Image (tube, rainbow, N blue to C red):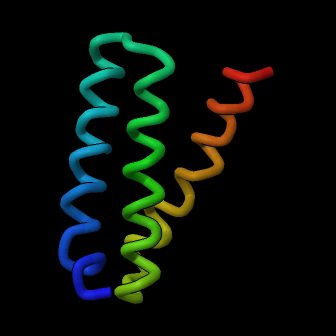
């Protein structure tokens, strides 16, 4: 559990930044998958560390990414 608390934010940040880079390079749909994994990681980290601001910020992004996944697969 300590590993998750220490490194999940760093790994998630790498995914979010990679998603942003891929969006700027117009690499679709890989950008929404990368950024989406980062958002999930930050949300889990916020829940584990009981950081309400992180949960609200990244938790509210999950439905937005779900719209992107629905748009991609339907």
Question: Considering only vertical position in the picture, is 46 above or below 74?
Answer: below
x, y percent for residue 58 = 45, 60
Q: Nearer the viewer, residue 32 or 55?
A: 32
x, y percent for residue 73 = 73, 23
**On the picture, is 47 further left or further right than 26?**
right
Question: Considering only vertical position in the picture, is 11 above or below 27?
Answer: below
Q: Quadrant of residue 22?
A: top left
x, y percent for residue 36 = 47, 44
The residue shown at (48%, 31%) is 32
The residue shown at (49%, 69%) is 56
In the image, farthest residue toward the right? 74
Q: How many marks?
A: 0
Q: Nearer the viewer, residue 10 or 59?
A: 10
Question: Considering only vertical position in the picture, is 54 above or below 1?
Answer: above
x, y percent for residue 45 = 37, 74
The residue shown at (68%, 35%) is 67
Question: Considering only vertical position in the picture, is 38 above or below 7?
Answer: above
**On the picture, is 67 further left or further right than 46?**
right
In which quadrant will I find the N terminus?
A: bottom left
In which quadrant will I find the C terminus?
A: top right
In the image, farthest residue toward the top? 26
The residue shown at (40%, 76%) is 46
């Amino acid at each position: 559990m300590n590993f998750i608390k220490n490194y999940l934010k760093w790994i998630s940040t790498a995914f979010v930044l990679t998603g942003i880079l891929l969006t700027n390079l117009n690499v679709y749909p890989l950008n929404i998958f990368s950024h989406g994994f980062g958002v999930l990681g930050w949300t889990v980290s916020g829940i584990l560390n009981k950081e309400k601001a992180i949960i609200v910020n990244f938790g509210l992004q999950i439905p937005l990414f779900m719209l992107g996944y629905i748009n991609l697969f339907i």
